[in-house]
Image: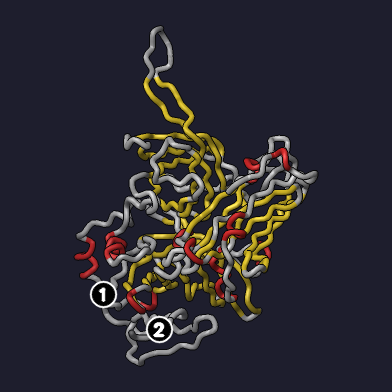
Amino acid sequence: MVIVPRSLLNRSGAIFILFTLLLAFQAPALLAGDLTIAGEMSVHPKSITAQTRFLILIDQPASDFCTSDVQISIEPAQIDLWVVPMSGAACSISGSPARQTIFSPRDLVPESYTFEEQVKVRYRLISDNEVIDLDNQVIRFVQLRALPERVESGSWITPKLPQSSLQIDQQEDLISLSLLDYDMGGRPIWLYSAGRIDGDTYEGDLFAYRETMCRMKHCSRAGSQKKGRIRLILRDTNDLVVQYQTGINLSSRVDTEAGYAYQRIDLVRSPEAQKIDASGAQIPDLVGNWVGGIITDGGNADRPSSLEVLDVEYLGPSGVKNQEHIFLAFAGSGRRQISGGVFPKDQVRLAIVCTDHRPETQRTQCQVMDIAQQSASCAGEFPLASVGAERISAPARCSDAAGPYDTRFEMFRLDPDDSRTRAASSAADDAAQDTTELQPTSELASKPLLGEERLGCGQGNGRWSQSHRDLNACD
């Protein structure tokens, strides 16, 4: 990416990026479905003041096609970003891997540069001499900064940098980070950064510290050296995109132009979740005791929130290649016996089905079905990245006699320690419980899902049928 010198700026103050790839390669015609190669654009944080910095994230999925690096041009009232399909020698047979690119527009303009009160951001695809608008957003500068989002404290890793890790801690609106990696000479290097998080973004300097030789009393024993900067965007509870601007201070594996997607390591998982890991699936650890249900907003005063204590158990995999993993939530905090897919149906409150879509999209998506909400039927959906250590929050949609309405599904972990560190002897205790196959007696077991009809195998067993999405059907 080449920026024309500032002496060549026109009167509008635009920053021009040389579009070398467009000139070098002929862009092939794309089918309508192939526009997904460009990915998605988002602006962070959601609330931006006229003085604060902001970031633009381009998230491109893996594709059989190849595209250029994202290009950018900046004007006071408009920011344009675009990608170009590539062909020929510039495009490898394997296509383009998934990648994230972060831009900080204020870094690309002079310090005295002033944006207008509203700035239009356009994301575009240049294909076959045609400009296709993929996304348009408007930045409206506000008076107050965004409230800080919560980052899950702990150890974060990215598969693209397997020999490094990022340690994160947040206290109110202050965040501290420690990057553990290697320098160009293969020596271990620890870099630190700390500061205030702005909404869902953080930018700060990276420092290395070394011991100093003191020749007089009360001198500092550690000297700091600035080694670069770090940019961080919190896309979801368990999904960070991080960019390092460190020059030659880190190993050659670190691309200073790329963004790296990080996930937090779950150091304590339930025994059931360990079995899920053994299957190779990327599935959240939902096993344990929660408080969960539907939370309605002020616009649905006649439809009150409904929360209860839930015990979530793992039922097992199903579907093609065992990509679908099923959790059931029972009323109360006591353990429920699930043996051979048999469970007490009269105590089931909801089902959560998490589908591992690899290798197609590299994502895991979870569906929440048959949420008990008085006289309404509710369903919701959330990605793996939305699952925090102690909370799940997802949009949901309910339908009752008055019609459909939007709300939220929330789960808060009730016992994050006890339920996730169950002793192996609990299996013996569970075996002593009653495992009689029960007939469907609850309202939940006899109520159809949204937009679907119930189908059963007629055996009356409390088994989950993934193909029928049914709590009363058999596999």
Instruction: State the residue in front, 363 or 256.
Output: 256
Quadrant of the image occupied by residue 190: top left
Mark 1 surroundings: few (<14), some (14-19) or many (≥20) residues within 10 A:
few
User: At which x and y percent is residue 63?
Assistant: 48, 67
User: At which x and y percent is residue 166?
Assistant: 41, 43
Provide the secondary structure element on which disc 2 rests.
loop
Identify the residue shown where x is 43% and y is 51%. Answer: 262
Provide the secondary structure element on which disc 1 rests.
loop
Q: Residue furthest top?
A: 216
Badge 1 amino acid: Ser
Instruction: State the residue in front, 27 or 268.
Output: 27
Badge 2 amino acid: Ser
- Residue 339 is marked as 1
Number of marks drawn: 2
Against 8, residue 42 (above or below) is below
Quadrant containing the C terminus is bottom left
User: At which x and y percent is residue 207?
Assistant: 46, 31
Against 17, residue 181 (above or below) is above
Instruction: State the residue in front, 165 or 408.
Output: 165
**Among numbered discs 1 and 2, the one appearing first in the sequence:** 1
Identify the residue shown where x is 34% and y is 67%. Answer: 313
Q: Residue furthest bottom?
A: 458
Identify the residue shown where x is 30% and y is 78%. Answer: 342
Q: Is residue 292 visible?
A: no
Q: Which residue is mark 2?
A: 467
161 left or right, relative to 197: left
